[in-house]
Image (cartoon, coloured by chain):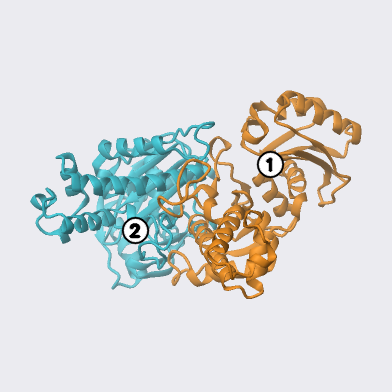
Chain colours: A cyan, B orange
């Protein structure tokens, strides 16, 4: 059984495992990562950990795939910047390839997670998918016409930084009114906390006595239990997320919009609400050309990054 | 000299000419088109006109390219709908190819005009370009990684129908707050007329005594002459158009954003304003990864469609 070594680099942990072409995940390993360590030393740590745990001189291992946060140049094999890790102009694939004598490929973590879902998850066999991760921010990945779209210089696809409210909320990116400011898990929590402050009668107070500790799950729980304040927060959230989704329908006409990240843990409940919103509101030329975009919920959970890193390797070897 | 027959289908006129691989345009011909005529009869009219004017049995003619408004499926060679022409489910390339014994290709008119600029105009040799036409609406074309991007089913790239103002102005597409409602030539004229109504002292009254006949050129002329009311209208227009451009920078990280349509006739004056706006406001991760997107003004004018149709043919034959 042919395998790839899949490496998922996160903000605090690096996870890796062998992944078979059929989507079997072998033993998972992880090591910590810190911005206080020199980037080259971190790479040596990864190499040492892999050598400790996996017999890499196995002819069934065909290559290595890496998912990495930040600005990645997949063609040069570099992490040009990863702010949270303190990495800059970091050549990763060349050293890794040399170390293990195997081809090595790297991509942005969101694109890699998307590829995991395309190869081994809910989006299997789809060829046009927009992926949105609803977490601290709104991350994104694009799979267009059967290929990962990385953008010119490998730095495209920041869908979460599309403006949906001209002169709206100040975004971490420096602009105002980005989708991320309205459709991230953080935005949902903040909106709920604000609504609580105005509504002492809201059921959300019973579920979470400290508004600073609000999270999406609490808002959804209160809404399901019939709290009108939570309902207003959720309806507003869906209208922003839904409008963003419709924008991406207009641009890419994808077969599916795939949702991941914290808010997507609401699963079918979120999916059906959003599907109804986009079908009701439609997009350009609704009548002559009705939308057919499915909303999907990511299925691989926290393993998507490792699966995807393996898939990235298979995808690149296939193309060669 | 190898040539293609380029056919540019517009809302009222169909223009065509031979285009050489070096970008030489031969004699141009045109015939009228009307939604009152059966679509199949219109195609026969086109054939008859071509036969009258061009000796098609010339071994230097390598194929035929067609640019067409509406929803085009380039793979099936059909115009699935073109509302203004009254066309629906119209198979165009097969009949055309059979008629002249030549390969025939079709694409959305905006994508075709963009391809004209890429082959023979200002965007020569660029490989990642976002094209916006600022006319009655905001049309768009995408050239990504050296290829026209048509979207799944050939119906993508409606960039003008991205929402930039949640619950904003009602758009012809049925949604609210689309970029088109703020950045089209029509929107500019309407905003100017509204500003005139509030400001009887505006210089715009001297240039255009009837606000219903306002157009972009008048607003720009008044602004250049120092009218503060016109300046406010233009500044507001640039902020919306600029934010839309920055969104597309975040998504595609293009080498250039190319502007066409009526407003783009302002040329360098518009270009430099917009370039300043996007450089000042930046986009995601401005500091670690400054934008390098150039603003360009389309150079082929009303011939872009014919040039592009020729280019479409060369592009497809190159790929085969």
Foreground: disc 1 or disc 2: 2
Residue sitting farthest toward the bottom: B226
- Which residue is drawn at the image coordinates 66% and 39% (left, top)? B69
Question: Where is residue B216 shown, x and y percent of the image?
Answer: 65, 60
Q: Residues within 10 Å of mark 1 (few under 14, many from 20)?
A: few
Circles 1, 2 touching at the beta carbon (< 8 Å): no
* Pick the front one: A264 or A29: A264
* Pick the front one: A108 or B292: B292
* Pick the front one: A120 or B23: B23
Determine the image quadrant of residue B275: bottom right
Q: Disc 2: which chain?
A: A
The dot on residue B319 is 1
Question: Where is residue A284 shown, x and y percent of the image?
Answer: 51, 40
- Secondary structure beneath label 1: helix
Is residue B16 among what the camera can see?
yes
- Which residue is drawn at the image coordinates 40% and 35% (left, top)? A279
Is residue B297 among what the camera can see?
no
Q: Please say if B46 is above or below B130.
A: above
Question: Where is residue A56 shown, x and y percent of the image?
Answer: 35, 51
* Pick the front one: B176 or B72: B176
Q: Please say if B43 is above or below B298.
A: above
Residue for badge 2:
A181
Quadrant placement of the C terminus of chain A: top right
- Secondary structure beneath label 2: helix
Question: Where is residue B192 shown, x and y percent of the image?
Answer: 58, 61
């Amino acid at each position: 059984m042919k395998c790839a070594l899949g490496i998922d680099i996160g903000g605090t942990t690096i996870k890796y495992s062998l992944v078979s072409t059929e989507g079997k995940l072998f033993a998972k390993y992880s090591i910590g990562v810190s911005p206080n360590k020199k980037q080259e030393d971190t790479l040596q740590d990864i190499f040492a950990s892999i050598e400790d745990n996996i017999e890499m001189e196995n002819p069934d291992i065909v290559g290595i795939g890496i998912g990495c946060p930040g600005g990645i140049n997949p063609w040069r094999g570099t992490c040009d910047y990863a702010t949270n890790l303190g990495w800059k102009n970091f050549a990763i694939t060349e050293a890794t390839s040399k170390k293990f004598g195997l081809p090595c490929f790297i991509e942005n973590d969101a694109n890699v997670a998307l590829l995991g879902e395309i190869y081994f998850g809910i989006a299997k066999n789809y060829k046009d998918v927009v992926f949105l991760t609803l977490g601290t921010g709104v991350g994104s990945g694009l799979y267009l016409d059967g290929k990962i779209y990385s953008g010119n210089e490998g730095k495209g696809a920041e869908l979460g930084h599309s403006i949906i409210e001209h002169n709206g909320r100040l975004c971490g990116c420096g602009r105002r009114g980005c989708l991320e400011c309205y459709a991230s898990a953080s935005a949902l929590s903040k909106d709920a906390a604000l609504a609580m402050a105005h509504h002492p009668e809201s059921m959300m107070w019973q579920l979470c006595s400290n508004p600073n500790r609000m999270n999406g799950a609490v808002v959804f729980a209160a809404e399901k239990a019939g709290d009108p304040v939570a309902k207003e927060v959720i309806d507003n959230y869906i209208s922003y997320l839904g409008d963003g989704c419709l924008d991406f329908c207009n641009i890419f006409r994808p077969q599916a919009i795939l949702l991941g990240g914290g808010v997507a843990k609401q699963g079918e409940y979120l999916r059906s609400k959003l599907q109804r919103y986009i079908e009701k509101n439609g997009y350009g030329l609704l009548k002559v050309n009705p939308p057919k975009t499915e909303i999907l919920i990511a299925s691989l959970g926290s393993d998507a990054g490792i699966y995807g890193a393996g898939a990235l390797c298979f995808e690149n070897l296939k193309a060669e």
